[in-house]
Amino acid sequence: MSGRILVTGGVRSGKSRHAESLLRPPHLPDSAPVTYIAAGPQRDDADWAARVAAHRERRPGTWSTVESTDAAAALRRATGPVLLDCLGTWLTAQLDEIDAWEAPESAWGSLLEERIDRLESAWAATDHVIAVTNEVGWGVVPAHRSGRVFADRLGLLNQRLAASADRVDLVVAGQVLTIKGEP
């Protein structure tokens, strides 16, 4: 496995499971060291803890986990193949950190762009990386401003990383459709 692969799809579509499969045989040996970047905010919630535990149980013991909202720095430090999961939780953490949910965009827009630029630069400089993201915007426009901010910014982030990706996979109901590059 080499290059940059963006895996997108809806919530609970099988995106993470698919991304993990790309870092296992026949693509890589089970003994291959992989850096798994959990890029979301820390949550103190039983449902979230169960989801995290299920993800950890699926991964081989040779994979190391880095929990950090600074995904750009984590990408730069990683050696070997990387799985960044997920851009939606990373963006949520960024919007939380800069208090963007209700503030006018003029108060935080340039700071968020700087963070996205750093992430995009680190993504482009990483030889073997898979990023998982949520596909947004296929439903109604969110009623609340925070939902619109999230959907708009994640949609733009996805477009930026997809533009420089070697491959983009869309996962729907556990089925994978490669929409850019070779499967």
Image: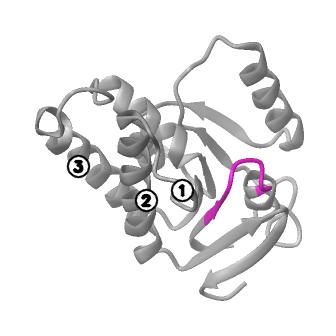
Graded by Cα atoms within 10 Å as few (under 14), some (14 to 19) or many (20 or more), the crowding at tag 2 reads: some
Direction from residue 86 to residue 110 in the image, left or right:
left
The residue furthest bottom is: 182
Q: Which mark is residue 136?
A: 1
Q: Residue 19: x and y, percent?
A: 73, 59
For the N terminus, the image quarter is: bottom right
Q: Disc 2 to disc 3, how far (Cα)?
A: 14 Å
Could you tell me which secondary element the residue under label 3 belongs to?
Answer: helix
Q: Are marks 1 and 3 in contact (CB under 8 Å)?
A: no
Question: Going 80% across and 37% down the picture, which residue do you hit?
Answer: 55
Q: Which residue is mark 3?
A: 113
Please tell me which of labels 1 and 3 falls first in the chain.
Answer: 3
Direction from residue 14 to residue 38 in the image, left or right:
left
Of the residues shown, which amino acid type is indicated by label 2?
A: Gly
Q: Quadrant of residue 139?
A: bottom right
Question: Going 78% across and 73% down the picture, which residue do you hit?
Answer: 176
Direction from residue 33 to residue 124 in the image, left or right:
left
Of the residues shown, which amino acid type is indicated by label 3?
A: Glu
What are the residue bounds of the magenta stretch? 7-14
Q: Are marks 2 and 3 in contact (CB under 8 Å)?
A: no
Could you tell me which secondary element the residue under label 2 belongs to?
Answer: helix
Point out the frontmost of discs 2 and 3: 2
Which of 57 and 74 lies nearest the eye of the viewer?
A: 57
Please tell me which of labels 2 and 3 falls first in the chain.
Answer: 3
Of the residues shown, which amino acid type is indicated by label 1?
A: Val
Specify whether residue 171 is painted magenta: no
Q: Are marks 2 and 1 in contact (CB under 8 Å)?
A: yes
- Vertically, is 44 above or below 154? above
